[in-house]
Image: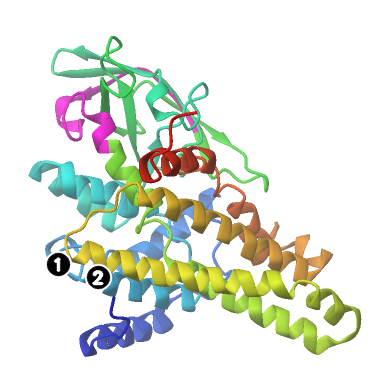
Amino acid sequence: MDLDFTPEEQAFREEARRWLEAHVPAPGSLASLDTPEGFEEHRRWERTMYDDRWSVVNWPAALGGRDASIVEWLVFAEEYYRVQAPKRVSQNGIFLLAPTLFEHGTNEQKARYLPPMASADEIWCQGWSEPDAGSDLAGIRSRARRDAGGWVLDGQKTWCSRGAFAEWCFAIFRSDPEAERHRGLTYFLVPMDAPGVTVRPIPQLDGETGFAEVFFEGVRVPDDQVLGGVGEGWRVAMSTAGSERGLNLRSPARYTEAAGRLLDRYVGRLAEGGEAAEAATALADRVARAYVDAEAYRLHTYWTASAVAEGQAVGAEASCNKIFWSETDLAIHGLALALGGTGSELLEPGPDGGSRPGEWLDGYLFALAGPIYAGTNEIQRNVVAERLLGLPRG
């Protein structure tokens, strides 16, 4: 792995930095994207990025991208987090569904779904988890039955991120109830305004609705909204899961930027002296570990990107990746709250006149979900044990 950036990559970084510094909204100036007004504010930001082809830099130019390499995509993410740019409201689409569409979609599906995804005209939510299945994707019960010219969907999905406000949902249904657990599944693309779809927002710890449960009652979808073939849902879903656990969803820049600010907070407490310095000193080893882990994740990601650029696939190793980034995220934000004292856990005035968590508390509340979504870390450890270490099933 060569960690020296080429002149072209350096020029790309400088161009991205200049554009972001000129256009990024002030940190904290947008309402939470888990509110109706904040969702639309973040959508407008995504459109601003799209207009200058920064929304999906690694996509083909014909689809609004810049034909950027995987390394340039990581470079852009570093610059994005450096200026504390807004969260990506389109992330489920551009980071999870888009790679799956590129791999499994028809030309017609790519032409239909990718452009409005890139421009944020259509935001996607993920419809995988179910009340009785949890992280066991093979245990889903929602059904799809054949009907003239298409399918009829029935069932319930829960913890659908972005589900309260999204226009589309990518979801998995059991199309052959007689098949084995991992077979007989089909991957569907479903409009959220289709007759028979009912959305019920789920309040989070902060009272905002970042998730929803979605009910499907006799929802009709045509055959061209099947992604990857009938009965191929497990195979297609594993492509999405690889993106979710591997390179796409969690850029290392998220962690190195946060770890750098965590270190600044630590040094600031030492400079205060007295009890603040004494309390900070007691956390020194944990601060060092969090900083080193963030840098290790960055190096590992560049190593993985180098392998992908050479044609290698990311397999079960993505489960190791997911465990590491989720627990590192929680460690960084938990330490930041500890260093900030009890005041870090108080709500702050928001731009809409209400109250909202401060950036570290907001990050911590979000990080609590990390070991759960994208497949719980308990499930990921089973994958590592069985598929990487060759241990017998428990």
- Pointers 2 and 1 in contact (C-beta within 8 Å): yes
* Residue at the (20%, 64%) spot, across then down: 64
Could you tell me the amino acid type at mark 1?
Ala
Q: Residues within 10 Å of mark 2 (few under 14, many from 20)?
A: some
Mark 1 or mark 2, which is nearer the start of the sequence? 2
Percent across and percent down for residue 172 are 33, 29
- At horizontal 50% and vertical 57% (from top left) the residue drawn is 324
Tell me where the magenta segment starts and ends, as one range: 213-236
Marks 2 and 1, how far apart in space? 8 Å
- Residue drawn at 15 percent across, 42 percent down: 105
Coordinates of residue 120 in the picture (x, y in percent): 33, 55
The quarter of the image holding the N terminus is bottom left
Q: Which residue is mark 1?
A: 61
Residue 164 percent location from the top left of the image: 49, 39
Per the image, label 2 sits on a secondary structure element best described as loop
* Residue 104 left/right relative to 387: left
- Rendered position, 130 above or below 345: above
**Apparent side of residue 369 relative to residue 266 in the rendered image (left or right):** left
The percent position of residue 388, horizontal first and vertical second, equals 37, 46
Please tell me whether residue 19 is drawn above or below residue 296 in the rendered image. below
Question: Circle 2 is placed at which residue position?
Answer: 53
